[in-house]
Amino acid sequence: MRPQSFRFHPPLGDLEGELLWTLRRAFGPPRGRPPASARPERVRFWASALALRERIAGRNPRAEIESEIGSAAAGELWRAREGLAGRTLLLRELLGRVTARASEIGIRPLALKGIALLESGASEAGSRPLLDLDLLVAGDEAPALAGALEGAGMVRSGAPERHHLAPLADPRLGEVELHLRIPGLTLDGAAPATAEGLARLGLTRPSEDLDGLDLPARALMAAHALAHSLDQHGLSPAAYPVTRLVADLLDLGVEEPDPRLRLPVSQRECRAAAALCRALAAGEPRQAGADGLALLGHTVAAATSPAYRARLRRRAALRALRRGQWSKFRAEILRRSGRSAKLQ
């Protein structure tokens, strides 16, 4: 990718007061001044659309939030945090079981994404959305671990993808995906980002809390977050908002990924993400610069503009076709066909 490539060109509008309130309470200084007005129903909308409900509840005194948006809206934020904390406890129990089973057969999985942020101490439990476990396993070991987990009662809950095996589910605790490589990342510009390759570069370390589990270096987590958000989910910001990337990068305290990793993200896009992080941490999103504001506007427009969402879906379908990702292209065709049938 060319260093100055930039894929995000949303329609830019003004940042309404409730959006500013949401961003400042999620990222800004603890005692930063909120906007003068904050309608509870709009705060609810933005906190949900930007996946920031739990983060706001984790960073601010409840009494202060209630004084600004009312007890009903504040209660919704705290209930979301409590629900996420409960789900996180279940997934951590699942992680312990999977790791123990892996250890029995001589396999060390590497935690990825949300569970890596939590297990490394970068993010607090109940503040970072976590839907399932993502674990990276050596390619020749992944089928053996999957078989062992199925033997322990887990069941397949979806289809495999090019970069991971079929997800496995425990009916009470949740799902786990065993990844073969980190999509989008390459090592030294050519080799795929596998568990073996990352370990050779010294980008992993043993967990201090869970025997048999490895954790990625923070610079690796930052690189994965950038690739996952801006490339893999860059055309689906309603499902994976850019604000989740900002939260992860700020929690990690890392702006630059490890230089030995090549990302499917341009230098300009990386700089835009860093600028947006700095501006939001300062409580002044308008100071993110043109590219940083475009990244933020990309998620804002996806949440508010049906026309922009439709444009992104078309781009996503064409990209899937170019990359040979037929399942995703087929899903878009079926979605459109279903919509057409309903209109007739």
Image: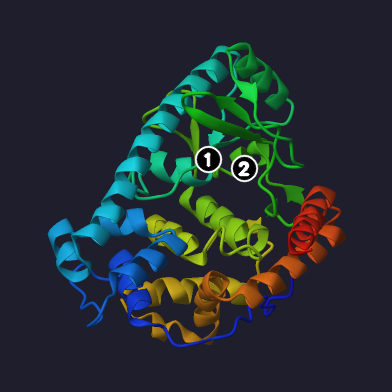
Relative to residue 51, is residue 3 depicted above or below? below
The residue that disc 2 covers is 198
Q: Which mark is residue 204?
A: 1
Seen from the viewer's position, the closer of residues 192 and 249 is 249
Does residue 259 appear anywhere in the picture? no
Residue positioned 61% across, 64% down in the render: 230
Relative to residue 139, is residue 184 depicted above or below? below
Secondary structure of residue under mark 2: helix
Residue positioned 46% across, 63% down in the render: 49
Q: Which mark is residue 240?
A: none
Seen from the viewer's position, the closer of residues 54 and 229 is 54
Q: Residues within 10 Å of mark 2 (few under 14, many from 20)?
A: many
Q: Position of residue 37 (x, y in %)?
A: 25, 81
Q: Position of residue 185 (x, y in %)?
A: 67, 53
Relative to residue 301, is residue 106 depicted above or below? above
Q: Report the amino acid beneath label 1.
A: Thr
Q: Report the amino acid beneath label 2.
A: Leu
Residue positioned 67% across, 80% down in the render: 4
For residue 301, side relative to residue 94 (left or right)? right
- Image quadrant containing the C terminus: bottom right
Secondary structure of residue under mark 1: strand
Seen from the viewer's position, the closer of residues 253 and 299 is 299
Say if mark 2 contacts mark 1, CB within 8 Å: yes
Does residue 84 appear anywhere in the picture? yes
